[in-house]
Image (cartoon, rainbow, N blue to C red):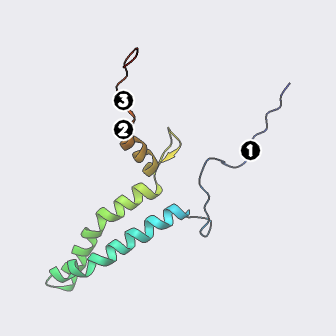
Amino acid sequence: MTRKVTVPIDMSSEQKTILGILSKRQLIYLIVGGLLIYSYTPVVYGLGPTFYIGALLCIFAALPVVAIVGVFGFLRKHKYNLNFDQYLLIKLGYKNQIGVWRKGSS
C-alpha cells in the first residue's frame, strides 16, 4: 500500500528570485525590451512637431515591444505547462526533427 502526499507548492514552475515576483528570464526580457525602447524613443520623439505629438508617437512606437515582452516573458501555455517562449522554440525546432523514414536498409 502506497501513500500519496500532496506537495503544497508548484515544483514545475520557475523560481521567482527577484523580489519574489520576477524570475531571471523575465528580468532579462524586461531589460532587453527597456533598452530597445530607450534606444529608439529619442528618434521617434524627434519626428513629432510638438511635445504632445512626439509623446504620442513614442507611446505607439513602444506598444509592439511591450506586447512582445509581455507575451514572451509572462504568458504560459498551460496545456503543455511551458512558458510561451519555450513553447515557440519547440514549435520552431519541430521541422528539423522530422525525417524521412524508410523501411529496410538504405
Residue 105 spot, x, y in % from top left:
40, 17
- Name the residue beneath numbered marker 2: 96
For the residues carrying marks 1 and 3, which lies nearer the camera in this image? 3
> Residue most toward the right?
1
Residue lying at 65% horizontally and 48% vertically, measured from the top left:
10
* 104 or 51: nearer the viewer: 104
> How far apart are the alpha carbons under marks 2 and 1?
37 Å
**On screen, 59 above or below 14?**
below
Kindly indicate the quadrant of the structure image that contains residue 43. Answer: bottom left
Few, some or many residues within 10 Å of mark 2 (<14, 14–19, 20+): few
Residue 36 spot, x, y in % from top left:
33, 72
Task: Give the secondary structure at mark 3.
Answer: loop
Residue lying at 47% horizontally and 66% vertically, measured from the top left:
28
- The quarter of the image holding the N terminus is top right
Few, some or many residues within 10 Å of mark 3 (<14, 14–19, 20+): few
Kindly indicate the quadrant of the structure image that contains residue 2. Answer: top right
Few, some or many residues within 10 Å of mark 1 (<14, 14–19, 20+): few
Three-letter amino acid code at disc 3? Gly
Three-letter amino acid code at disc 1? Val
Residue 68 spot, x, y in % from top left:
35, 59
Residue 55 spot, x, y in % from top left:
25, 79
Three-letter amino acid code at disc 2? Asn
For the residues carrying marks 2 and 1, which lies nearer the camera in this image? 2
Kindly indicate the quadrant of the structure image that contains residue 47. Answer: bottom left
- Name the residue beneath numbered marker 1: 7
| Left or right of residue 95: residue 27 | right
Task: Give the secondary structure at mark 2.
Answer: helix
* Mark before the other along the chain sequence, 1 or 3: 1
Residues at discs 1 and 3 in contact (Cβ within 8 Å): no
* Mark before the other along the chain sequence, 2 or 1: 1
- Name the residue beneath numbered marker 3: 99
* 66 or 100: nearer the viewer: 100
